[in-house]
Image (cartoon, rainbow, N blue to C red):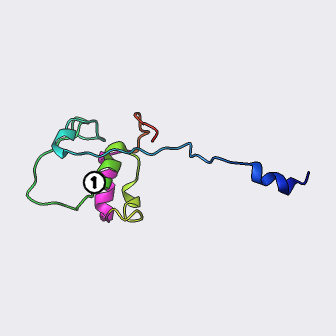
Amino acid sequence: MHPEARLAEFQPKVESAVRLAMCRALDVAKIGGMRAGEGRSGLLEVTKAAGADCELTIQELGALVNGTHSPSDFSLRGWGSPGAEIQSTLRGMFPPQVPFLHENF
């Protein structure tokens, strides 16, 4: 039998070993108190502000909370474009993490 004839018998299945977090932060006020970077207490404090330093999409907020994406990648993904200073602040507040809760979809 010719090797090229056996090619039709193969049914490969390709699957990624890395699964990114798929969640949304639905209520910003309720993420207050989570562990976050190096601040006064190491906990995130959420308060209302008079104005915003930048706009975040829900994808950006979820990525920050889960620590799965760098703020410098947001513009590449079409999620927004926070400036370099804001990116640095966000990375300090939300350091990279390995998601501890996942579900295969």
Which residue is drawn at the image coordinates 28% and 59% (left, top)? 86
Decide whether residue 31 is among the magenta residues: no
Where in the figure is residue 93, as x and y percent of width and height? 29, 46
Badge 1: residue crowd in 10 Å (few <14, some 14–19, many ≥20): some
Residue sticking out furthest to the right: 1
Residue 90 sits inside the magenta stretch? yes
- Kind of residue at badge 1: Ile
Q: Name the residue at 10% across, 50% down.
A: 48
Q: Which residues are magenta?
A: 80-95
Q: Residue at x 84, y 57 (%)?
A: 4
- The reply, left or right, for residue 32 in relation to residue 81 is left
Q: Quadrant of the C terminus?
A: top left
Q: Whole-percent x and y of residue 44?
A: 22, 40
Q: Which residue is mark 1?
A: 58
Front residue of 14/20: it is 14
Q: Is residue 93 left or right of residue 40?
A: right
Closest to the observer: 66 or 72? 66
Residue found 41% across the figure and 38% down from its top: 99
Comparing 56 with 88, the one in front is 56
Local secondary structure at mark 1 = helix
* Count of picture labels: 1
Q: Position of residue 19 (x, y in %)?
A: 48, 44
Left or right relative to 41: residue 96: right
Type of secondary structure dominating the magenta stretch = helix
Image location (x, y in percent) of residue 83:
30, 65
